[in-house]
């Protein structure tokens, strides 16, 4: 059995210094970003900032099930995404990078610090997990931008900085790929064994997989959208409308059948009609009960979460004031 390859002994940037596209002086981080429910200042906490920029914890948590959400192959380039009539939406979350839903695909803009050799030596080569995430993220951009037309789309949509031209990019990619084992992909995070991932299936995995099941995951899935109750019920119970339409048509047909002389004396048809009618009534009442129960659960959950978060914020403020004094 082949043993996994370890990178911990000697980590070095996956490209040479003369292939750096940006200088260290050109690397500018945001002043502050939202990290969880807190305001994070990258200069004061660079490790958590890089974790937020590169790591994919949600996808890694369900990695063994990702074959249900996508195919283990590279993502299609940007020009193909356009041909599929997909609109490119920018996301700053690595977990949402290359996730698609209907006619949308989410793409994370290329972090400029990944194009600088000194930054890799200073911040990324000392941490194997971050190193693999960074290599995997860079590899994903190579999937997306393989032609000049892809680079034009990347500039147009904000995926790539305007300063990255075709000659710079092709030289960088050639050097980067010469340092990658594209057969084993042992230098990249395991998330990048897959390219595009379907959002609807990721939501289902987060709702119903026992290892990650929770009330929050059941409600929001992998990537939450609108938190309005109306939108939630439309997303999850719209199929009931189609069921009710089919049931109504069948009941109407049975009613017409029972009005005919030929079927009035047919005991089997009458028994079937009676059973189906009773079943339909019970099912409708049960589903209405489930929807009402779900609404109550959602209301209680949101109320409880709000109260708990408020207490947490208050206690945190009180602790900080106490520490100051």
Image (spheres, rainbow, N blue to C red):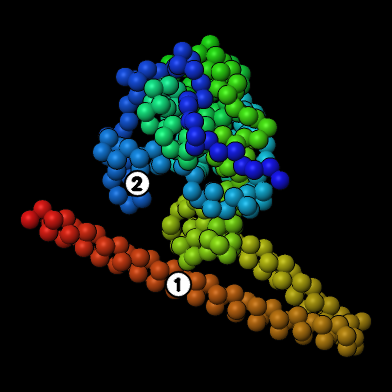
Q: Count the marks.
A: 2
Asked which quadrant contains residue 105, the reply is top right
Single out the mark in the foreground, 2 or 1.
2
**Residue 107, horizontal then vertical, whole percent:** 51, 35
Asked which quadrant contains residue 125, the reply is top left
Q: Say left or right for 264 vs 51.
A: right
Q: Nearer the viewer, residue 23 or 68?
A: 23
The residue furthest front is 9
The residue furthest left is 325
Q: Say left or right for 235 vs 52.
A: right
Q: CA distance from mark 2 to mark 1?
A: 28 Å
Dot 1 surroundings within 10 Å: few (below 14), some, or many (20 or more)? few
Element under label 1? helix
The residue furthest right is 262
Could you tell me which quadrant the C terminus lies in?
A: bottom left
Q: Residue at x 39, y 22 (%)?
A: 118
Q: Nearer the viewer, residue 181 or 87?
A: 181
Element under label 2? strand
Q: Say left or right for 263 vs 125.
A: right
* CB atoms of marks 2 and 1 within 8 Å: no
Q: Residue at x 60, y 21 (%)?
A: 178
Label for residue 218?
none
The residue furthest top is 167
Residue 239's place in the image compared with 150, above or below, is below
Label for residue 297?
1
Q: Which residue is mark 2?
A: 35
**Residue 218, horizontal then vertical, whole percent:** 52, 63
The answer to whether any part of residue 152 appears in the image is no
**Residue 277, horizontal then vertical, whole percent:** 73, 81
Q: Residue at x 84, y 77 (%)?
A: 257
Between discs 2 and 1, the one toward the N terminus: 2
């Amino acid at each position: 059995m082949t043993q996994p390859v370890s990178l911990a002994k000697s980590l070095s940037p996956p490209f040479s210094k003369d292939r750096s596209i940006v200088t260290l002086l050109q690397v500018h981080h945001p002043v502050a970003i939202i990290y969880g429910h807190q305001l994070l200042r990258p200069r004061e906490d660079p490790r958590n900032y890089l974790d937020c920029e590169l790591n994919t914890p949600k996808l890694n948590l369900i990695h063994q099930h990702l074959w249900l959400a996508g195919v283990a192959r590279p993502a299609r380039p940007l020009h193909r995404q356009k041909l599929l009539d997909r609109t490119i939406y920018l996301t700053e979350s690595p977990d949402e990078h290359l996730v698609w839903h209907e006619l949308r695909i989410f793409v994370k803009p290329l972090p400029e610090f990944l194009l600088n050799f000194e930054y890799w030596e200073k911040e990324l080569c000392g941490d194997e997990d971050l190193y693999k995430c960074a290599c995997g993220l860079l590899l994903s951009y190579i999937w997306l931008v393989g032609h000049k037309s892809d680079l034009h789309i990347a500039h147009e949509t904000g995926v790539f900085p305007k300063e990255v031209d075709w000659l710079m990019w092709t030289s960088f990619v050639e050097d980067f790929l010469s340092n990658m084992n594209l057969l084993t992909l042992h230098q990249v995070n395991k998330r990048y064994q897959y390219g595009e991932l379907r959002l609807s299936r990721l939501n289902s995995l987060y709702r119903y997989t026992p290892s990650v099941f929770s009330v929050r995951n059941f409600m929001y899935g992998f990537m939450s959208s609108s938190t309005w109750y109306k939108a939630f019920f439309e997303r999850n119970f719209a199929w009931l409308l189609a069921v009710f339409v089919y049931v109504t048509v069948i009941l109407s047909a049975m009613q017409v059948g029972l009005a005919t002389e030929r079927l009035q004396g047919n005991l089997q048809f009458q028994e079937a009609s009676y059973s189906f009618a009773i079943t339909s009534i019970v099912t409708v009442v049960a589903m209405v009960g489930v929807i009402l129960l779900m609404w109550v659960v959602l209301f209680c959950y949101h109320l409880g979460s709000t109260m708990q978060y408020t207490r947490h914020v208050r206690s945190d403020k009180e602790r900080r004031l106490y520490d100051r004094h």
